[in-house]
Amino acid sequence: MAPSRWFGGLKMGGMAFSGGNILQRSGIATPVAMSPRRMAALAGVFVAVSALSAFAGTVPARAQMAALTAPASNSADLMAVYTITGVPVDATAGNAVQAREKAVAEGQKAAFRQLAARLSGPQARDSVSAPTDAELPSLVLGVAVENEKTSSVRYVGTISVSFFPDTAKKRLQAAGLPVFDTPAKPMVVLPIFQPAPDAQPQLFDERSPWKAVWSGRPRSGLTPLVVPSGDLSDIAALDATKALALDQTGLATLMRRYHTEDAVVVKAVLSGDGQTRKIDLSLARPGGTFQSLGSVAAPVTSSLTAALDAASDTIADWLDAQWRTQAGSAVSLIGSGSLTITVTLPGGLTDWLAVRQALSQQIVSGWSLQSLTNREAVVSVTHRGAAADLVHAMAENGIILADDGTGRWVMTRGVPPAAAPQPSPSQPSTVVIQ
């Protein structure tokens, strides 16, 4: 539901949050009541407009530099990393208002523990202390109500909580926890459902409850997951049988269509009956084989949708853990170095944004912009490990980094830089200041 007005009372899912000014905080229920998707969208628009204005030369030089050297990771994806969805809340108090405030405050504390597990590993959920009521306003950016039920003294519901990235990260680091918050590249998720072990597999079938769960799942976590719409073009590219066979052509078509470079097929098979009913889970990536992720209980006395929801959480958490382990290994590289790099930008802003995204990797400990034109930039980069490690990390992100033959490092998007022409004996050599 849209807010009733921008800077006054905001209503979501039947719950109203009030405050005369967006900078004022009333109580501990929420600093700003705004849906995580709306906050992520606004953040992405802000960054895009800032970068575009800087390139167009329509803002002062200092503002241009600030926009172009802002954190390189996409703000919408970063906001998704710091958003925890599906947090159950249940509290009883003297009246409905007190019960609501108590439930939402407890939900924010529980969400922070879930955030700790996402960014620092499962063990962090129990090792980090919950925020105090006084800390919540500085940690919580917003709360959105997913569903709710109220009585005169009780409040029951489910909420989403978005945290301020900087303050939440500092809070975890202050507790002695390592923090990994760089989002992975988006991947297409293809949900295969079998209502029985011998049943026909379903992929884009409108009756599939597994597809419905994934389609309704908010885009949060370290690994952004894109669910195809299942229209006629998707069906023509890949059916359930081909998906289970990891058909390379079909998978590649969907990855191109949804602008991703990776995909994952997630299979859920319902088996058993009564209290013994369960959902067996497995997944596979292109070029790989299916790997079992165990099972989730799905007794007939509870909702199948709820069980499938929990199953999707299991898969998303596993993918996050894989990314955290794989990409986070860059932090443990031995040694460090620094390079001054000339970045060629034949595509202008588009190329610059791609390079800036690549510089957000954990292997890059810091970088600064030395100069910028509409076709070239010069950046100073400090990195973990050796220069070869940085070259490899950039290549995995579609960025070519190489010595051009004169001792000068050149970076370009997708195309290896041509070797610089060697000066003739009759000409003085060009000196490149690093």
Image: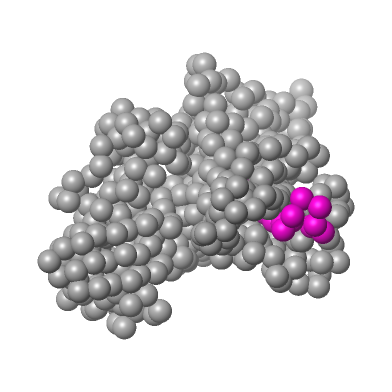
Q: Is 290 in front, or is 8?
A: 290
Q: Is 51 in front, or is 159?
A: 159
Which quadrant: the N terminus? Answer: bottom left
Q: In which image quadrant can residue 423 be found? A: top right
When the figure is inspected, residue 233 is found, relative to residue 320, above or below; the finding is below
The residue that appears at 63% across and 39% down in the rendered structure is: 293
Q: Is 46 in front, or is 168?
A: 168
Asked if residue 188 lies in the magenta stretch, the reply is yes
Asked if residue 236 lies in the magenta stretch, the reply is no
Highlighted range, magenta: 184-201
- Where's residue 279, x and y in %? 64, 49
Whether residue 350 is visible to the viewer of this picture, yes or no, is no
The residue that appears at 52% across and 16% down in the rendered structure is: 334
Question: Left or right: 329 with respect to 179?
Answer: right
Question: Left or right: 47 with respect to 215?
Answer: left
Residue, far bottom:
4
The residue that appears at 24% across and 78% down in the rendered structure is: 9
Residue, far left:
94
- Where's residue 247, x and y in %? 86, 49
Residue, far top:
334
